[in-house]
Amino acid sequence: METHAGRFRVYRVVESVPHINLFDTEATRLYTAYQSGYGDRQDDIDALRTGDLVEATLGGDPDDPDEAWSVQSVERVGGVRMAFAVDADPPTVAADLWTEGQERPSTTALRWAGDPVAEVAVQPRAPLPGGAFVPSVLTGLVPMEDRLGTLSSGGEPVTDALFLDPDPPDTDRYSRPYGTAVFFGAAGEALRDEFYDRYGIDPTGDSRPEYDPYGI
């Protein structure tokens, strides 16, 4: 067994998946780790939430892609609170930002009282597995670590991120060729609350959609 230590972004996927995905923010590699079987350290694992930033040591066999890693130690050092809504109409600003046939994400700033406090990004479905947006976010497969640090428009740290998919996670036909992400800084809390009210999201709850990816 080998060990690997680093800083990771946590992706808990959904309840039906018995693993946690950990994205190495420096090596840009995604690790799959067991989420149970840790004895007296189980509470530390259960406390991890999607979007958490942790310092961790993993143990596993890098030559066996079918075997998950184990979390040997973990400490939360920060994070971004993540919320999700599926089967949800995108905001007008996202529809206006999208250009037919675009192949890369595009972003624009959102202002509150004249100041940039958030950013909206549209992510093309084409490069994502099966074209799925929110399921790809939940598993850590959407490249966005550079978006989760600071707002490029104002330099403020990102505190919250909202991911909007216009279609349900178990569909095989998509109504729009993109998904939407909204990244908020601390000064954008009022704007965040407006978005959460619109999409029926409790900012203190777990808004991951309930679905079984093994059944899709």
Image (spheres, rainbow, N blue to C red):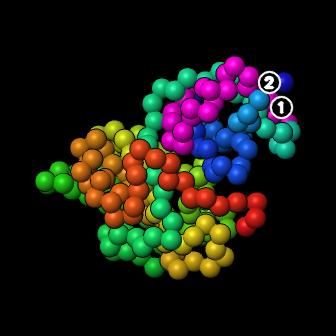
Q: Which label sits on residue 140?
A: none
The quadrant where residue 174 appears: bottom right
Tell me what residue is drawn at x 76 percent, y 64 percent: 215
Asked whether the beta carbons under mark 1 and mark 2 sit within 8 Å of each other, the answer is yes
Inspect the image, locate mark 2, and give the three-letter code of the amino acid beneath it: Glu
Residue 9 in view of the camera: no
Residue at the left extreme, as displayed: 113
Q: Secondary structure at mark 1?
A: loop
Q: Is residue 39 left or right of residue 66?
A: left
Residue on which the image places disc 1: 61
Mark sitting earlier along the chain (1/2): 2
| Quarter of the picture holding the N terminus | top right
Residue appearing at x 74%, y 22% in the figure = 39
- Magenta segment boundaries in residue numbering: 38-63
Dot 1 crowding, Cα within 10 Å, few <14, some 14–19, many 20+? some
Quick check: 16 above or below 96? above
Q: Position of residue 182 (x, y in %)?
A: 38, 56
